[in-house]
Amino acid sequence: MKRKSKVLNDEKFTKKRRLEEVKEEEDGREDHGTSFNDHSTSPSGLGDIGVIESITIKNFMCHHLLGPFQFGPNVNFIVGNNGSGKSAILTALIVGLGGKATITNRGASLKGFVKNGESTADVTVKLRNRGPDAYKGDVYGECISIEQRISSDGVRTCRLKSKTGHLVSNKKDELTAILDHFNIQVDNPVSILNQEMSKQFLHSKSEADKYKFFMKATLLEQMKRDYIHIKQTKAVTREQVERQEECLKDLKQEFLQKKERYENLSSVGKMKETLEELKKMMAWCLVREKERLVQQLQEQIDAEERNHKHEENLQLCQNKVTVAEKTLQEIQSRLHSRKEEEESLSEDCRKIKEEVKSKNKAQKEQEVVYFRAVNKLKQSEKEQSLLHERIHKVKNIGSENKKAEAEHTKRLQKISSLRTQLEKHETQCTALNQEIKDRQQALFKGKEELDKLRLEEKNIQVSMEAKLKRKNQLLASRSNKLKRFGDNMPDLLDTIDKAYIQGRFTKKPLGPIGACINLKDPALAVAVESCLRSFMKTFCCDNYKDEAVLQDLMSRYFSKGNRPQIIVSPFSGSVYRVQGRGVNHPEYPSVLDSLSIANPVITNCLIDMRGIESILIIKEKDAARRVMQQGRPPRNCREAFTVEGDQVYPNRYYTPDFSMAKYLGGDLETEIRMVESELENYKAQLSRFQLHLSSVNEDIQRMEAKLHSTIMTLKKTLATVNQVKAGVTELENVEEEQTDDISTLEEVAQENQQRIDGEKETVEEAKEELEEHKRTTKEVDCQYVDVRNRIEQLAEETEPLKEEQGKAEAQCSKLERSLKILEKKLMDHQDNMQAMRSDLALKEEEVTEFVAKAKEISPERQQVERQQVERSARSIDVEITRLRRKISVQESSHGDHEQVVREYAEALANYRDKSNQVRDLKKFIDRLDNIMSDRQTRYKIMRRSLSVRCKLYFNNFLIKMNCCGSMMFDHSSETLSISVKPPGRENDSMSDMRSLSGGERSFSTVCFILSLWEITESPFRCLDEFDVYMDMHNRRISLDLLLELSERQHLRQFFFITPLSTSNLPKSDHIKIHQLQDPERAGGHTGDEDLG
């Protein structure tokens, strides 16, 4: 049911328009009346629009994920224990359809619906959109998806998508239009009745509240408000009519005065005839002067056509640009060749450096081999010396005794014990070495992570400082918008004003450009700023002398690398003509069309330097790609920008690095809040990084301590191993001294000598190989030094070339600016010539027109010119003025004839128009009185009819429970009282709902809701825990009533939420049961089942 409200307070509407509006209002009210007819007359497409197809919630209330729930088109039971998400689904439905938090009775703010620990909550509701009554069916398709996102600070964003997932709109007005089209009333308890409202609205509310509930549910309250508004408008209109009647009296008096002057008017003929003769002379005198002007202009055009100075200067500048570009290309070529050589040498340097490392490593390894062979040789020689001593000692020793045998046995046992200890300590050393290696790797990874964290912390600090600086600029710009362009910009502009007053500037510089332009559409701020990003802080100077003065003033406030750009170009008082070279698209404006610029110098500067007349602004990305990249771009269009600032070329696409306008932004407070929010995020990130850094530092310190402890343990173990090895060696030497015979020792000595000889050869070979490694290492080192020297030489040679390149680029840039200026001058010259030719043609046409007019006044030119002789137009004009003054004096007593006639006609017309308006307004008010009287009568009839139908349905539903009751409407005092008698207490006096049991009250509530359902329209209806206080008997009867109603209204959708079992429900294709799992806060899965 469409809600309409017409406001009739516009004084400028005609009577016809007012009558049409009243008729339309009457038709709209008739729509209200017919909407309450019986459901059998529902339109054919009733079940095809507004039905809820599915709902999905995420991080909503205490649930991580619920859904998606695929609902049936008729009856849906949502069943589950307390905490399983039943009420969360109903609350999400209200919020998803745009309802406020207070409607849900679950909280005062939307931020309370976001799950603890989460930043946002998401609700997605899909509505059916089929049939001939579909809302924008060609746009949305057969399904409208409403996605609501709620942030932790209570901000709600809405996204409306089509069936294919395409984003159609994100505006609240569009959602309101959809709900109105589907007749969905989220705040109407008859459509969605939650558990809390179900408890309170019968037994805890007053009778006046119940009456308001009835009026709101049936939309009678809306009709009442509309009638009151129309009455107020009618009273205002009546007051206006009374004021118009007062004005009408004054107009009538003025009309009578004008009429009297008109009747008493007389003419002065002779002076007017003389005046006509002077006008004829004046006409041909003007013709002669115009012909003289045409001749002078033709002479000027001929002189300008013979002047070729602009073409010659342009050709000379073009030659200079060609030479400068050629020089720049040569320098760039030389730089490129050196860069390639430097890159090649860098690669060679890297390879040689790696080779040096490998050679050094091989040399060190060879040194180890050499020194190991030398040590081995020394050990062998030492052992040979000891062996000779033993042989000498054995020869002098006699026979062995028994004591030596006992000592021999004891030494063998001790050697065995020491070897066992040695194996144990060596195993421990191996384990410790592996542990040290693992700890060193872990320590290395920890330090790498620490370095990365420190780098990220530094990046966050830099970003935070930039945001803080931006915040300070925005806060300062509250009082002075120029501070958006820098803290020192207001001081610089004051200094420029003072310098201009002192005469230091020929013409006052203009800028910054961003402060001199205004947007016609504030939504295009990001697009325009993305286009003019480098010119927002730029200044314009008329000449290079003024530029030097401005540079000196800027040096006081800006460092050399941060000074605003200055563009030098002669100031012009008019905007360039860009009709032939600008883009002209029927749908999308150019940047020039989107800006409002008061100063033509700024406009010409942006046309010269940025070409804003040839850049389009296309809001949608897809449309921008289609226009610029799918086919041939529009004529004279170089590029385009989207509303997000994306830059679109015919063959490429760029995205900006900012999403909010810095200089042209309109909503300063919103930008300040966003910057503050980003600052808080950076602070939180920095705090987390600092905590993480502290934790990683502690881990590194613990790892270093453990590594140091393990190394000390390894050193002690190695010392123990050396001691055990020394003991074993000593005991074995003693054993050998006592057991070996002289022949064996001599054989061993001979073998040792042979081994010593072989080791000497090995030492010599290792020494030769070591020398070879040293030689090759030295050669590679020399190569590395040579390459490094060459790289440094190239770097030294490149610096002058870079300086030359910079100078050449500056020269090219300067020449290009001069070329543009000369091209502009030539174009201005050509435009001036064209303007002069056009002016000549216009003046020739004017001469022709003057001649034609003069012939109309006096056909004979020669005769008139003979009469005027050499008189000028000025002298004739003086005489005409004198004669007119004389005529005016003569007519002062009566007034000018034409003026008197005109004033009389105007007074008559004004009086008649105002009289007709007052008459029409009176008729309109009378007509409105009759219509409102009729509508008030129909309104009372409808109110009485609805209340009677509601009573009948309520009593009919109570009879099914063997109860009796009454529903009393008092429309004069606007109250509604409900009384119910339970079974067995029929003879008791009537009592209100509070005297009933919980189940009886719940059943009565269901009966009242069903009564309202019978007389109201809505695509779906929801009841939350309607049977929680009922016994099984009342619950069964209530379910039967609900299912019976749903069968009659099979094109409507019903949602019944209950924690009780639904096993006794009949099997039907129209019933769908959604069984929720028991509450598990970590998950939100559901199970659906159909009956049928």
Image: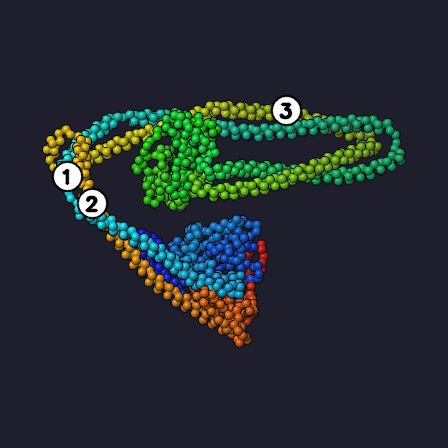
Q: Nearer the N terminus, badge 3 or badge 1? A: 1
Residue at image point 46% right, 38% down: 479
Crowding at mark 2 (Cα within 10 Å: few <14, some 14-19, many 20+): some
Indicate which disc residue 272 carries. Answer: 1
Residue type, label 1:
Lys
Q: Secondary structure at mark 2?
A: helix
Crowding at mark 3 (Cα within 10 Å: few <14, some 14-19, many 20+): some
Q: Is residue 729 above or below residue 198?
A: above
570 sits to left or right of 668:
left
Residues under numbered marks 3 and 1 in contact, where contact means CB atoms less than 8 Å apart: no
Residue at image point 47% right, 72% down: 956
Q: Nearer the N terminus, badge 1 or badge 2? A: 1
Q: Is residue 440 above or below residue 963?
A: above
Residue type, label 2:
Val
Q: Secondary structure at mark 3?
A: helix
Question: Percent from the top left, x then y, of residue 124?
Answer: 48, 54
Marks 3/2: CA distance? Answer: 129 Å
Indicate which disc residue 771 carries. Answer: 3
Marks 1/2: CA distance? Answer: 17 Å
Q: How many marks?
A: 3
